[in-house]
Amino acid sequence: MGFDAEKFLNTKMQPRTADVPVPGLASWFGEGEPVFKVRGITGQELGQAKQAVATRKDLAALVDGIIGGTSKEKAESAKKILGMGEAVPEQVALRIHIVRLGSVDPDLDEEATVKLCTCYPVEFEVIGKKILELTGQGHEPGKAEASGVTPASEAR
């Protein structure tokens, strides 16, 4: 029996999720266990993350090309204004986007994700690896939602 495309297309799918313990971040969790809830990202999101890294690299090269000939200081200043002041390795930049997109609770913005990467690189790496692991496993068939209470039939 081959792949059942019709069944595949008609099956509701949901991203896989997992809880990632982050004991090093306990100071910022108040009551309860220090845990990040993460999800696998979609193919589109993975593509967006890769494109963001490529765009940033292209923009840095463009700034160097336009301004770099006149003054290295001006080029560095322009890159800093555009948020490209420090050389961030491509894999780190990609992981920042992946962690931002795959974090469910807490829902991290880019600034918080960069600070997590900078200040807690081990926890950042563990979270990112789990998101990539879930992404690699693909979505899972969704659980059937309860249809609610069926109203009783009226007597005729």
Image (cartoon, grey):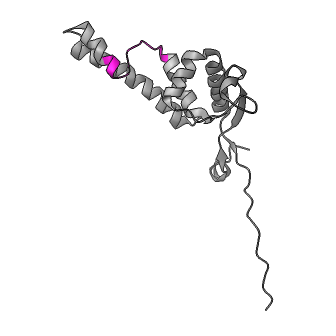
Q: Is residue 82 left or right of residue 101?
A: left
**Residue 15 appears at what percent x and percent y?**
65, 40
The magenta-colored residue range is 79-90
Residue 54 sits in which quadrant?
Answer: top left
Q: Residue furthest left?
A: 70
| 144, above or below 65, in the image | below
Residue at 56%, 32% (x, y): give it.
Answer: 108
Residue 135 sits in which quadrant?
Answer: top right
Q: Residue furthest bottom?
A: 156
**Magenta stretch: dominant secondary structure:** loop
**Residue 30 appears at what percent x and percent y?**
70, 31
Residue at 70%, 48% (x, y): give it.
Answer: 142
**Residue 110 appears at what percent x and percent y?**
49, 29
Residue at 24%, 12% (x, y): give it.
Answer: 74
**Residue 119 appears at what percent x and percent y?**
57, 16
- Of the 4 image quadrants, the one containing the N terminus is top right
Query: Foreground: 119 or 145?
Result: 119
Query: Foreground: 20 or 12?
Result: 20
Q: Look at the image and say whether residue 10 sits in the magenta stretch.
A: no
Q: Is residue 130 left or right of residue 51?
A: right
Residue at 62%, 24% (x, y): give it.
Answer: 128
